[in-house]
Structures are given as structure tokens and as C-alpha cells.
């Protein structure tokens, strides 16, 4: 099948590459000329495990192309995916202009081409409930026959950064939002090879599909804030959140995933989507109280390590060298959007600390935010050299089993604040560290 993907961000690039891997002819369209040139030269602008392997194969077999020309991009294509950004606008609501402008442009081109082929326009971006109707209007307003010439479908994406390719190739479920049987059949055929193990392709109405995405992300974010509050209470009552997690996760109604306490969630999805759903509720006269609390708890949790180190030094961080391990919002990515580490660094800088950061992948992306306001280390031991404290913000593999003796030697002062519960508190105490983690006795 010929497929077009409009937008070559995370979702667009991964989707395009994975559809090509399944044998489809994929053309990716982006307005960013530099990015298209880069991709056409075989360079991938993001770090995502396994993407390069599939990307190279698809390009070598000429099943994955890139262009800035929308007309060329959609010519002959049966399915046009939108994988466009929906950043929060000034008032916090999702800015739909990229999606709606693209819909208008595609509609204009279809009218111009006067091509009677049936097309499916699919929205993969996370968009407020009802956006599919607005996209459909863009086509209907230009005289295109909805159901005859064009069907607008919602197909939310559930991939996680850092395991995006794997998530795309083996989804837990695929959600198709459409009332058109014809569109549903084509979409089911498209996804059949991805769900061979029997995972479902769920066909629902378009609004429910749009809502599923927000409900899933908001529930996951709620689990994290909930566990962070459990951890905060554990600390006060002398319990251990890791043990509590194991105990509750054996209840199959709860399950083992997404129960790790830490320093809050970040990334380009959870904070934005939880906010958008809470806002949508308010807009419709409903106060989604849990979500407001989820966000408040997260703000508080993201500041936590910085406040702890400030308390330790009696409010005086001026000129103190503080090392930060882990700058991306989670391991396996160079993405630093809404990263807890960045909230922490901001806080430390405001109080005059000298921050030195280290991350296996996210130094360059951190430089885009902090430039030379902080120092960057080439390795984790270099980062702690002469530091008065080490703050651990993500659980990259290399942080899980470092040479703690070397860390102890390099640190000027043995304070370690571990936001990801990587080490055994008893062992850390034995080694002479002052060690604090999340929700566990020191
Ligand atoms: C999230 C969802 O997991 C995906 O299903 C969804 O498709 C995606 O958003 C999206 O909407 O595009 P992602 O933002 O890549 O994916 O990252 P996650 O792996 O979900 O982690 C989000 C944050 O939660 C990270 O900061 C992570 O450290 C934190 N987290 C996660 C915890 O603090 N505890 C946990 O137990 C799990």
C-alpha cells in the first residue's frame, strides 16, 4: 500500500519506518527543509534504539522517501497519516493549527487533483476529543464527499520513547476510531502484521478513540503520582516503597507496571496530556479533581532532590559544586522535554550552585536549554570530581552498577540523593555515603 506520513517527529518517523518495514511504500512529508535533506541523506535526527536498522533497510530497498512537497507526498497514496505537533497554546489548550492547516492543504490538493480515489486521512497526533470532526469539516467544506472520497480516522499512538520501534511493531492494541466500515477494513488490514500474536485491533467511534489516548496517559500519570505519594508517606512511617510496590503488584487487578516511585514524570506527553484533559473537563463544566492533584504532586516531586540538597546545606548552595547524573527525562532517549533534571537544575542555578551534568545521550539537548550556565562532564566519574553532592535523576544502565568506591573517592562530600532507588541503602551507608532515596529508610 502507498502511505504518506505528514510530520517527521518521533511518531511520524517511527511510524513511517515501521510501515516501510512491513513492506509498504512510505513517503514522509515535512515542512522543515533541513530535516528532509538530512533524512534523505540517511541521517536520523533523533536517538531511538533500533530505528537506524529499519530506517537503513527501508531506504536501501527504496520503500521510505522524504519530501517537502505535499502534492508529491500524497500522490497515489491510499492512507495519509498526520503525525504533527499539538503544542500547548498560550492558554494551555492544544494548538491544533498544524493539524488543521495540514488538513486544509491536503483537502485543497485533492480538490485540485480531481482524483476520485478513496483516501483515508488518519490522525496519529494526540488531539482533543472532537478534533477529528474539525479535520473532517476541512474536507467537507471544500466539497469533498465524506465517506465517498475521504474518511477521517483517529488512530492514537501509544509508543514510548526509548522503545518506540518495539512498541510500534508489537503494540498491545491498535485503536481505530471511525464510523466507516470501509476505512475500518483498510486500517485493520494495514495493522494485521503488527498484531499476529493476537493483540486486538479495536474499532470504536472516533471520539472514543481520541479519548482513549488521554485516558491511558492520564491513568498512567496518576499511577506515578500516586506511588510518589505512597513513597512520601512510606518515608514518614518507616516503610519501604519498593516492598510495598512488590506487594501490591501481585494483585492482578493492579499489575506490576508503572508503579515506580521517583522524581516525577516528564517528557512531551504526560504533563501536556494530563493538563489538556483537565482543561477539557473544565471547559465542559467538569472539575477533574484527580488530574489537578496528579499535576501538583508531580511539580512537588520534581523539585524534591533540589530542595533536599538545599536543606542539607542549610539553604546555602552558593558556589557549591553539585553533580547531576541523568539529564534526559528517562533512560534510552536524548529527549529532555519536561525532564525532572531540568527542573532541578533550574532550582539549583537560581540559588547560585555550580552544576555539572552528565548523561550518556542528552548532553547536546541539555546544552540547548542551559548553554554554558552549567558544566558538562564526559563521564560519570568526571562529573562527581570535587562535587559536594551527587543527584541521580534517571536510571540509565551505567548508573545502576557504577564503581561506588570511585564515586566515594571523587566526591568532596559523600552526599548522594538518588531519585531512582538504584542502590542498597545499607551498602551505601557501609561505604560511608550519606545516601537518601525515594520512599525507603536511609
Ligand atoms: C508515554 C506513554 O507511556 C506512551 O504509551 C505514550 O504513547 C506516550 O507517552 C505518548 O503519549 O506519546 P513516554 O512519554 O515516552 O511515553 O515515556 P514513559 O516511559 O511513559 O515515561 C514517562 C515518565 O514517567 C518518565 O519521566 C518516567 O521516568 C516516569 N515514570 C514511568 C515513573 O516515574 N515511574 C514509572 O513507574 C514509570
Image (cartoon, rainbow, N blue to C red):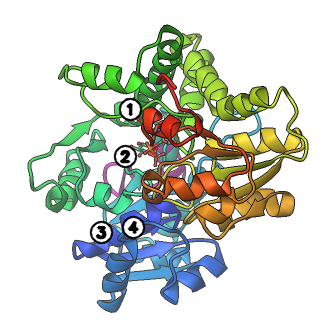
The quadrant of the picture occupied by the N terminus is bottom left
Q: Is mark 1 within 8 Å of ligand 1?
A: yes
> Which circle's residue, 3 or 1, is located before the other in the chain?
3
Q: CA distance from mark 2 to mark 1?
A: 9 Å
Residue at image mark 3? 19
Q: Between tags 2 and 4, which lies in front?
A: 4
Viewer can see residue 254: no
Horizontal placement of 167 versus 75: left or right? Answer: left
Magenta highlight range: 136-155
Query: Which quarter of the rendered image does ligand 1 occupy?
Result: top left
Residue sitting at 60 percent across and 67 percent down?
A: 379
| Secondary structure found at label 2 | loop
Residue sitting at 44 percent across and 66 percent down?
A: 48
Q: Are marks 3 and 4 in contact (CB under 8 Å)?
A: no
Q: Position of residue 442 (x, y in %)?
A: 52, 26
> Which circle's residue, 2 or 4, is located before the other in the chain?
4
Horizontal placement of 182 versus 163: left or right? Answer: left
Residue at image mark 1? 216
Residue sitting at 78 percent across and 62 percent down?
A: 375
Q: Is mark 2 within 8 Å of ligand 1?
A: yes
Residue at image mark 2? 158
Amino acid at each position: 500500500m502507498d502511505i504518506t506520513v505528514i510530520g517527521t517527529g518521533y511518531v511520524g518517523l517511527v511510524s513511517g519506518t515501521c510501515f516501510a518495514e512491513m513492506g509498504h511504500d512510505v513517503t514522509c512529508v515535512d515542512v522543515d527543509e533541513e530535516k528532509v535533506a538530512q533524512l534523505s541523506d540517511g541521517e536520523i535526527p533523533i536517538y531511538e534504539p533500533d530505528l537506524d536498522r529499519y530506517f537503513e533497510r527501508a531506504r536501501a530497498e527504496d520503500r521510505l522517501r522524504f519530501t517537502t512537497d505535499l502534492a508529491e507526498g500524497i500522490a497515489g497514496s491510499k492512507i495519509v497519516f498526520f503525525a504533527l505537533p499539538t503544542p500547548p497554546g498560550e492558554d494551555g489548550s492544544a494548538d491544533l493549527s498544524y493539524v488543521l492547516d495540514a488538513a486544509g492543504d491536503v483537502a485543497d490538493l485533492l480538490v485540485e487533483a480531481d482524483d476520485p480515489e478513496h483516501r483515508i486521512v488518519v490522525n496519529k497526533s494526540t488531539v482533543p476529543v472532537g478534533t477529528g470532526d474539525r479535520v473532517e469539516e476541512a474536507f467537507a467544506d471544500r466539497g469533498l464527499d465524506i465517506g465517498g472520497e475521504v474518511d477521517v480516522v483517529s488512530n492514537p499512538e501509544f509508543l514510548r520513547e526509548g522503545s518506540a520501534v518495539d512498541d510500534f511493531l508489537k503494540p498491545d492494541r491498535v485503536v481505530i476510531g471511525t464510523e466507516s466500515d470501509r476505512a475500518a477494513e483498510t486500517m485493520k488490514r494495514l495493522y494485521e502484521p503488527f498484531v499476529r500474536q493476537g493483540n486486538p485491533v479495536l474499532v470504536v467511534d472516533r471520539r472514543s478513540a481520541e479519548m482513549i489516548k488521554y485516558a491511558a496517559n492520564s491513568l498512567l500519570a496518576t499511577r506515578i503520582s500516586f506511588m510518589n505519594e505512597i513513597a512520601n508517606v512510606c518515608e514518614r512511617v518507616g516503610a519501604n516503597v519498593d516492598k510495598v510496590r512488590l506487594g501490591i503488584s501481585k494483585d492482578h487487578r493492579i499489575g506490576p507496571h508503572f508503579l515506580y516511585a521517583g522524581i516525577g514524570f516528564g517528557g512531551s506527553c504526560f504533563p501536556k496530556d494530563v493538563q489538556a484533559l483537565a482543561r477539557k473537563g473544565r471547559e465542559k463544566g467538569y472539575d477533574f479533581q484527580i488530574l489537578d492533584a496528579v499535576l501538583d504532586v508531580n511539580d512537588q516531586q520534581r523539585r524534591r532532590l533540589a530542595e533536599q540538597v538545599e536543606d542539607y546545606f542549610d539553604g546555602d548552595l552558593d558556589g557549591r559544586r553539585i553533580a547531576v547524573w541523568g539529564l534526559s527525562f528517562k533512560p534510552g532517549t536524548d529527549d529532555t522535554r519536561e525532564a525532572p533534571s531540568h527542573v532541578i537544575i533550574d532550582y539549583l542555578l537560581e540559588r547560585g550552585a555550580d552544576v555539572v551534568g552528565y548523561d550518556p545521550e542528552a548532553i547536546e539537548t541539555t546544552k540547548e536549554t542551559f548553554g554554558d550556565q552549567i558544566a558538562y562532564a564526559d563521564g560519570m566519574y568526571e562529573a562527581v570530581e570535587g562535587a559536594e553532592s551527587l543527584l541521580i535523576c534517571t536510571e540509565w544502565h551505567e548508573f545502576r552498577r557504577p564503581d561506588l568506591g570511585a564515586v566515594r573517592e571523587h566526591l568532596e562530600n559523600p552526599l548522594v540523593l538518588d531519585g531512582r532507588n538504584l542502590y542498597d541503602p545499607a551498602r551505601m551507608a557501609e561505604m560511608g555515603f550519606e545516601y537518601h532515596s525515594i520512599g525507603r529508610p536511609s
